[in-house]
Image: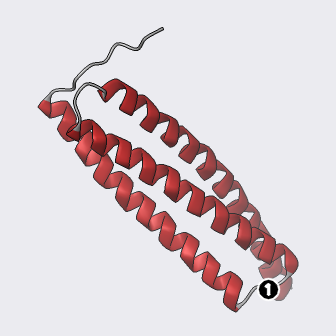
Amino acid sequence: MALSEYEFNSQQSSHFLRLAKKSNWAAAGLAVFAISNLYVILVAPGKPLELFITIALTALSALTSLAIQKAGAGFLAITKTQGSDISLMQASNRKLQLAFTLLAWTFAILSIRFIYHSQSFIKILS
Protein backbone atom coordinates (compact mmCIF):
# COMPACT_ATOMS: atom_id res chain seq x y z
CA MET A 1 0.00 0.00 0.00
CA ALA A 2 1.53 3.28 -1.10
CA LEU A 3 1.76 6.02 1.49
CA SER A 4 0.04 9.25 0.56
CA GLU A 5 2.41 12.14 1.25
CA TYR A 6 1.50 15.47 2.72
CA GLU A 7 3.39 18.75 2.85
CA PHE A 8 3.23 20.53 6.21
CA ASN A 9 2.49 24.24 6.18
CA SER A 10 4.96 26.85 7.51
CA GLN A 11 3.47 26.88 11.03
CA GLN A 12 3.70 23.09 11.24
CA SER A 13 7.22 23.16 9.81
CA SER A 14 8.31 25.64 12.47
CA HIS A 15 7.03 23.18 15.09
CA PHE A 16 9.25 20.46 13.58
CA LEU A 17 12.19 22.87 13.48
CA ARG A 18 11.81 23.56 17.23
CA LEU A 19 11.50 19.83 17.86
CA ALA A 20 14.68 19.18 15.87
CA LYS A 21 16.61 21.79 17.88
CA LYS A 22 15.38 20.42 21.21
CA SER A 23 16.24 16.90 20.08
CA ASN A 24 19.81 18.02 19.41
CA TRP A 25 20.08 19.51 22.91
CA ALA A 26 18.72 16.33 24.49
CA ALA A 27 21.09 14.18 22.42
CA ALA A 28 24.03 16.38 23.43
CA GLY A 29 23.12 16.06 27.12
CA LEU A 30 22.94 12.29 26.88
CA ALA A 31 26.25 12.22 25.00
CA VAL A 32 27.88 14.17 27.86
CA PHE A 33 26.40 11.66 30.32
CA ALA A 34 27.80 8.77 28.26
CA ILE A 35 31.24 10.40 28.08
CA SER A 36 31.28 11.06 31.82
CA ASN A 37 30.42 7.41 32.48
CA LEU A 38 33.15 6.33 30.07
CA TYR A 39 35.59 8.49 32.03
CA VAL A 40 34.55 6.72 35.24
CA ILE A 41 35.11 3.33 33.60
CA LEU A 42 38.61 4.31 32.48
CA VAL A 43 39.73 6.13 35.64
CA ALA A 44 38.00 4.39 38.54
CA PRO A 45 36.24 1.20 37.43
CA GLY A 46 35.32 0.06 40.96
CA LYS A 47 33.82 -3.28 41.92
CA PRO A 48 32.56 -5.69 39.22
CA LEU A 49 28.87 -4.85 39.75
CA GLU A 50 29.58 -1.11 39.69
CA LEU A 51 31.65 -1.56 36.54
CA PHE A 52 28.88 -3.56 34.83
CA ILE A 53 26.26 -0.94 35.76
CA THR A 54 28.46 1.90 34.51
CA ILE A 55 29.19 0.11 31.23
CA ALA A 56 25.47 -0.53 30.73
CA LEU A 57 24.63 3.12 31.45
CA THR A 58 27.34 4.28 29.07
CA ALA A 59 26.08 2.08 26.24
CA LEU A 60 22.41 2.87 26.80
CA SER A 61 22.92 6.62 27.05
CA ALA A 62 25.12 6.66 23.93
CA LEU A 63 22.54 4.65 21.95
CA THR A 64 19.71 6.85 23.23
CA SER A 65 21.65 9.97 22.27
CA LEU A 66 22.16 8.60 18.77
CA ALA A 67 18.47 7.67 18.37
CA ILE A 68 17.34 11.14 19.51
CA GLN A 69 19.88 12.83 17.24
CA LYS A 70 18.64 10.81 14.25
CA ALA A 71 15.03 11.64 15.11
CA GLY A 72 15.98 15.31 15.27
CA ALA A 73 17.70 15.07 11.89
CA GLY A 74 14.51 13.61 10.45
CA PHE A 75 12.40 16.40 11.95
CA LEU A 76 14.82 18.95 10.48
CA ALA A 77 14.54 17.23 7.09
CA ILE A 78 10.77 17.76 7.23
CA THR A 79 11.38 21.50 7.20
CA LYS A 80 13.87 21.35 4.30
CA THR A 81 12.34 18.84 1.90
CA GLN A 82 9.16 18.63 -0.10
CA GLY A 83 7.01 15.65 -0.88
CA SER A 84 8.11 13.27 1.88
CA ASP A 85 6.98 14.89 5.13
CA ILE A 86 4.83 11.98 6.31
CA SER A 87 7.52 9.38 5.62
CA LEU A 88 10.12 11.49 7.41
CA MET A 89 7.81 12.03 10.37
CA GLN A 90 7.08 8.32 10.67
CA ALA A 91 10.78 7.43 10.53
CA SER A 92 11.57 10.06 13.16
CA ASN A 93 8.77 8.80 15.38
CA ARG A 94 10.21 5.26 15.18
CA LYS A 95 13.58 6.66 16.33
CA LEU A 96 11.84 8.39 19.24
CA GLN A 97 10.09 5.16 20.19
CA LEU A 98 13.48 3.45 20.29
CA ALA A 99 14.89 6.31 22.36
CA PHE A 100 12.05 6.06 24.89
CA THR A 101 12.58 2.31 25.19
CA LEU A 102 16.29 2.84 25.80
CA LEU A 103 15.51 5.58 28.33
CA ALA A 104 13.25 3.19 30.24
CA TRP A 105 16.12 0.69 30.47
CA THR A 106 18.49 3.49 31.49
CA PHE A 107 16.20 4.55 34.32
CA ALA A 108 15.84 0.95 35.45
CA ILE A 109 19.62 0.57 35.67
CA LEU A 110 19.97 3.95 37.37
CA SER A 111 17.46 2.72 39.95
CA ILE A 112 19.55 -0.40 40.54
CA ARG A 113 22.64 1.76 41.00
CA PHE A 114 20.76 4.02 43.41
CA ILE A 115 19.58 1.04 45.48
CA TYR A 116 23.08 -0.47 45.44
CA HIS A 117 24.66 2.78 46.64
CA SER A 118 21.88 3.39 49.18
CA GLN A 119 22.52 -0.01 50.76
CA SER A 120 26.24 0.72 50.86
CA PHE A 121 25.50 4.06 52.50
CA ILE A 122 23.21 2.42 55.07
CA LYS A 123 25.98 -0.05 55.95
CA ILE A 124 28.37 2.86 56.57
CA LEU A 125 25.86 4.52 58.90
CA SER A 126 25.24 1.29 60.86
Looking at the rendering, which quadrant does residue 113 occupy? bottom right
> Quick check: 107 above or below 28?
above
Q: Is residue 45 left or right of residue 40?
A: right
* Residue in the picture at 29% in, 41% down: 77
Q: Decide which of 73, 33 is in the foreground and name it.
A: 73
| Horizontal arrangement in the rendering, residue 52 relative to residue 25 (left or right) | right
Q: Position of residue 39 (x, y in %)?
A: 61, 84
Secondary structure of the residue carrying numbered label 1: loop
Residue 34 location (% of width, % of height): 57, 70
Residue type at mark 1?
Gly
Query: What residue did someone put label 1 on?
Result: 46
Quadrant location of the C terminus in the rendered image: bottom right
Q: Position of residue 89 (x, y in %)?
A: 37, 31
Give the quarter of the image for residue 62. bottom right
Is 104 located above or below residue 42 in the figure? above
Tell me the crowding category of disc 1: few under 14, some 14 to 19, or many 20 or more residues within 10 angstroms, Cα based. few
Residue beneath the point at 50% across and 68% down: 31
